[in-house]
Amino acid sequence: MKYEDWIAKNTPLKRVSSLEPYRDEIQHLVSLNYTLTQITEYLRDVRDIEISRQSVKKFLLGKTAQNKPVKAEKSENVESEFGR
């Protein structure tokens, strides 16, 4: 069986966050020093995603922190916003 055939016959079981398509936008907002509350409002108002502040925080601490470090402008520490 070829790689492509196996992929065509099998559906990935790993769950993907509903925020994943907006990762770059969210990271950019963080880098501009927007708060979690503001980012949550952006997702609700602009992207029409009903999501809690805690879910945004979890996304940023999980996937984003592992795959792409987020650097804040100015001297603010991004981790302090997320309670570390």
Image (spheres, helix red, strand yellow):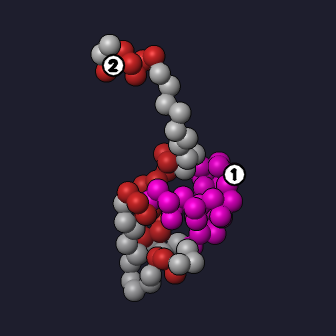
Q: Is residue 13 left or right of residue 24?
A: right
- Give the residue drawn at x 40%, y 75%: 72
Q: Position of residue 50 (x, y in %)?
A: 69, 51
Crowding at label 1, few (<14), some or many (≥20) Cα neighbours within 10 Å? Answer: few
Q: CA distance from mark 2 to mark 1?
A: 36 Å
Residue 28, quarter of the rendered image: bottom left
Task: Residue 47: say if magenta.
Answer: yes
Number of numbered discs: 2
- Give the residue drawn at x 43%, y 63%: 65
Q: Position of residue 29 (x, y in %)?
A: 48, 65
Looking at the picture, which amino acid does disc 2 mark?
A: Glu
Q: Is residue 45 left or right of residue 77?
A: right
Q: Which residue is mark 2?
A: 4
Above-or-below relation of 6 to 38: above
Highlighted magenta segment, given as a residue range = 35-64
Q: Which residue is mark 1?
A: 50
Say which element carries label 1. Answer: loop
Question: Which is more foreground, mark 2 or mark 1?
Answer: 2
Residue 73 visible in the picture: yes
Looking at the picture, which amino acid does disc 1 mark?
A: Glu
Residue 25 visible in the picture: no
